[in-house]
Amino acid sequence: MDKDLLDKILSSVAGSENKGQTAEKVETGTSSQCNLTEFVGAGIGDTVGLVIANLDYHLHENMKLDPKYRSIGIVSSRTGGAPHVMSADEAVKATNTEVVSVEFCRDTKGGAGHGSTIIFAAEDVSDARRAVEIMLSALDRNFGNVYGCDAGHIELHYTARASYALNKAFQAPIGKAFGITVGAPAAVGLLMADMAMKTANVDIVTYASPASGTCFSNEIIVTFSGDSGAVRQSVLAARDVGLSVLRGMGQNPVSVTKPTL
């Protein structure tokens, strides 16, 4: 056989084997490879959703859960705080569950913001699972209002009717319009907060800075409530200011998915 032809055949065979190995690695990394009944799914922000049908008695006791709740749903992420709470708020509105815990941690894989862990409690595991499913499905939409770049990030979140997850995390008045603005580095967040409060007639609910109200993240976060139109107007004004400052730092902040505001 001609030597050049033989080299081409051997090269082709080697290439096919390498493609097969690559495909296998990609496949084994997908969520479909987790066969645990506790595994619900995964999402943006290195987010994982799990359920426990019958929580261990000692854990139940130490977590100080109401005895009527046997099952819990858990959603935990490396990146994202407010988008996860917004998504959890949608989930709790649609299911027979209670948000019993919202915790933020200093994470973002070394970035300026938070990771998060949110726990739903339910009498029936199917309710807990459904809450986790709804929350995971809402993440892409809520990450659309997170804009990031190397210099920092901004977040804008709005709902016409806050529910129990937002109340748990940010003391949002239940049933009222509610807005959140986040800016990093923290100076960006403070300017955004000032613009939000001056733009329309809204009432501040919480204020958090790197040393107070956050897990030492490099952010300033303000939440506010009021008339639906006023809250939305304040959120949009804060967005424009935050984007302008990050662009002034020589960056081009872009939405993580697709903006909804």
Image (spheres, rainbow, N blue to C red):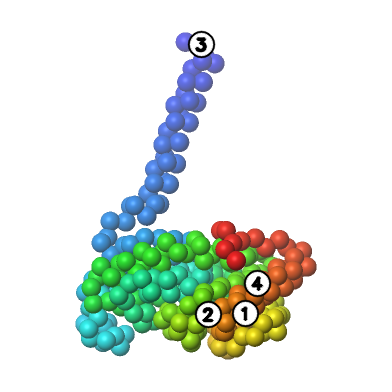
Disc 2 designates what residue? 177
Q: Residue at x 47, y 20 (%)?
A: 9
Disc 4 designates what residue? 236
Q: Nearer the viewer, mark 3 or mark 1?
A: 1
Residue type of the residue flagged with mark 1: Ala
Q: Secondary structure at mark 4?
A: helix
> Closer to the camera, 192 or 159?
159
**First along the sequence among labels 2 and 3:** 3
Left or right of 101? Residue 215 is: right
Label 1 Cα neighbours within 10 Å, binned few <14 / some 14-19 / many ≥20: some
Label 1 to label 4, Cα distance in Å?
A: 10 Å
Give the number of the disc on residue 230.
1
**First along the sequence among labels 2 and 4:** 2
Q: Residue at x 32, y 76 (%)?
A: 97
Q: Residue at x 51, y 20 (%)?
A: 8
Label 3 Cα neighbours within 10 Å, binned few <14 / some 14-19 / many ≥20: few
Residue type of the residue flagged with mark 2: Ala
Label 3 to label 4, Cα distance in Å?
A: 70 Å
